[in-house]
Amino acid sequence: MQIRTEIFKDAAGIRLVHQAAFGQRTEADLVEALREDEASLPHYSRVAVTDKGEIVGHVLLSRIYIEDIPSLALAPVGVKPHWQRKGIGSELIRQVIEEAREAGESHIVVLGHDSYYPQFGFERAVDYGIEAPFPVPVDFFLIMPLERQALKGIRGIVRYSKPFSTV
């Protein structure tokens, strides 16, 4: 298994990953819409590829804002069902977080399970005065600072890029 940065020819394989992982096309459509949306740049995107060249996992970070302060959204993360529960999703997340950190990004927001994402360093966003732009349980709307004091003085409502509201 190799985890690497997404390249152009991976698009069809990534679409198949999300359709299989979620049993619908919404997340695959989101990835495609984010690729075409300049306001959601930069993107940090990783794929998990088998020795035979099959893409079996994908993760994407894209630009969002907390009020007017740049941040990133972790969405979606998908692994084909046969490959789930083997640590692939976790490794994809770890690598894309490190890539964003090395690029000088400050924080990442995720809407996800409060029993899964804290292992990567995510905490409840509401504890920092950061809120979702839609109704969501506070335990599922999480944020992770990528550097010390990255959330100091930051408060407000997250603004997702347009593709998040269109799919």
Image: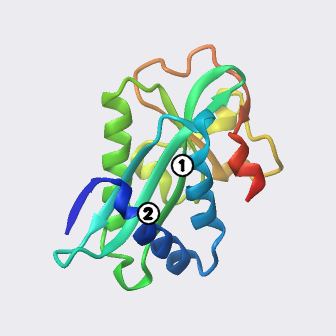
**Spot occupied by residue 62 in the image (x, y as percentages of width and height):** 53, 41
Residue assigned mark 1? 35
Residue beneath the point at 43% across and 56% down: 59
Where residue 47 sits, quadrant-wise, is: bottom left
Give the left or right position of residue 60, taking residue 134 as reference: left
**Label 2: few (<14), some or many (≥20) within 10 Å?**
some
- Name the quadrant of the N terminus: bottom left
Give the left or right position of residue 44, taking residue 158 as reference: left
Instruction: For mark 2, give the secondary structure.
Output: helix
**Spot occupied by residue 119 in the image (x, y as percentages of width and height):** 41, 51
Residue 22 vs residue 116, the one in the foreground: 22
**Spot occupied by residue 26 in the image (x, y as percentages of width and height):** 66, 68
Mark 1 is on which residue type? Answer: Arg
Image mark for residue 11: 2
**Residue positioned most to the right:** 135
Sequence-first tag of 2 and 1: 2
The residues bearing labels 2 and 1 have C-alpha atoms spaced at a distance of 10 Å
